[in-house]
């Protein structure tokens, strides 16, 4: 009897040892599985889960909407257009500038007027009309002085006084300037750029101020007109009755430039289109 009890105890003890050993082995397997997880070993992934992104901010939210595909630039859109700008210097006045504005309105054409400060002071209502009718207005100095021959202080005063006169008359701040006589230098350009403006030269000079005959000016414009061009004319000044020739010229060049496929635009529009020479607009 005692032998049977001893044998049973050995059997129970063996079973107990087996159970404890199995539990120990199971625990080791769990520890090994944890050691193989991505959290414990950065850069590794388990076979059933994707590792979390290393930079959550770099991942778009699930409701993220991608931006639309960029449309063609204005320059690309305008590549096949033929743009040209008509410009008028030295005004405004109450005689020729108003006649020019009437012609532009009749032909649905926008132009650019580079005005002299003293003239704006005399005819603020005409300067205001220029802007109200959709034309661009630019600075042409206060007294039509050669800016290259002035000190920096005097040059800046010429520009600043004209800016203020235009603002008071029209409510607009010009960002285009044409130096009298087209006379520029590095220091003049520095002054212009200091006012956050661009200098505008020209590609066709009608020499209307000299009283050039209408047919000669017409031939000059039509021969030398080009894509992205800028035509120089005047709305005041010059020799006696010279600007009367400009008034006579204007309807014909508008008609004939349009017939050649040109769109007559302001210098602002020309700049926006990208269709201009950087040697002309600086």
Image: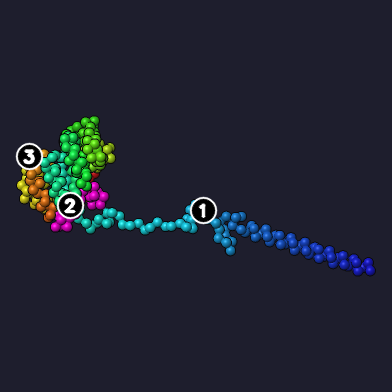
Calculate the distance from the C-alpha at mark 3 to the C-alpha at mark 2: 29 Å
**Eye-nearest disc, 2 or 1:** 2
Residue 166 seen: no
Q: Residue 193 location, x and y as percent?
A: 26, 39
**Residue appearing at x 78%, y 64% in the figure:** 18
**Residue appearing at x 14%, y 39% in the figure:** 93
The residue carrying pointer 3 sits among few (fewer than 14), some (14 to 19) or many (20 or more) residues within 10 Å by Cα, namely: few
**What residue span does the magenta drawing correspond to?**
257-275
Q: Is residue 262 magenta?
A: yes
| Image position of 243 (left or right of 135) | left
Give whichever of discs 3 and 2 has the lower sequence position: 2
The residue carrying pointer 1 sits among few (fewer than 14), some (14 to 19) or many (20 or more) residues within 10 Å by Cα, namely: few
Q: Is residue 107 above or below residue 118?
A: below
Q: Quadrant of residue 113?
A: top left
Say what secondary structure mark 1 lies in.
Answer: helix
Q: How is the image coloured?
A: rainbow
Which residue is farthest right? 1
Residue 123 got which mark?
none
Q: Nearer the viewer, residue 176 or 276?
A: 176
Q: Residue 94 location, x and y as percent?
A: 13, 40
Q: Residue 40 location, x and y as percent?
A: 61, 55
Residue 56 got which mark?
1
**Eye-nearest disc, 3 or 2:** 2
Give whichever of discs 1 and 3 has the lower sequence position: 1
Residue 108 got which mark?
2
Residue 239 got which mark?
3
Calculate the distance from the C-alpha at mark 2 to the C-alpha at mark 1: 57 Å
Quadrant where the image shows the N terminus? bottom right
The residue carrying pointer 2 sits among few (fewer than 14), some (14 to 19) or many (20 or more) residues within 10 Å by Cα, namely: few
Q: Is residue 189 magenta?
A: no
């Amino acid at each position: 009897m005692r032998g049977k009890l001893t044998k049973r105890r050995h059997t129970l003890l063996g079973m107990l040892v087996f159970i404890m050993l199995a539990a120990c082995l199971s625990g080791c397997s769990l520890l090994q599985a944890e050691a193989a997880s991505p959290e414990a070993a950065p850069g590794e992934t388990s076979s059933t889960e994707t590792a979390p992104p290393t930079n959550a901010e770099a991942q778009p939210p699930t409701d993220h909407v991608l931006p639309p595909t960029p449309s063609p630039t204005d320059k690309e859109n305008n590549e096949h257009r033929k743009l040209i700008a008509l410009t008028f210097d030295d005004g405004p006045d109450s005689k020729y500038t108003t006649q020019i504005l009437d012609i532009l309105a009749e032909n649905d054409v926008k132009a650019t007027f580079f005005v002299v400060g003293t003239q704006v002071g005399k005819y603020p209502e005409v300067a205001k009309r220029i802007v109200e009718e959709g034309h661009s207005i630019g600075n042409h100095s206060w007294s039509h002085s050669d800016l290259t021959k002035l000190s920096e202080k005097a040059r800046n005063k010429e520009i600043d006084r004209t800016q203020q006169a235009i603002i008071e008359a029209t409510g607009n701040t010009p960002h285009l300037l044409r130096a009298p006589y087209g006379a520029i230098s590095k220091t003049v350009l520095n002054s212009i750029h200091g006012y956050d403006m661009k200098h505008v030269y020209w590609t066709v000079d009608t020499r209307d101020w000299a009283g050039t005959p209408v047919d000669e000016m017409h031939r000059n414009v039509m021969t030398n007109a080009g894509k992205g061009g800028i035509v120089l004319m005047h709305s005041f000044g010059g020799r006696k009755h010279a600007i009367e020739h400009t008034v006579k010229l204007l309807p014909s060049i508008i008609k004939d430039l349009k017939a050649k496929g040109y769109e007559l635009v302001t210098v602002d529009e020309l700049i926006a289109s990208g269709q201009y020479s950087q040697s002309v607009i600086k």
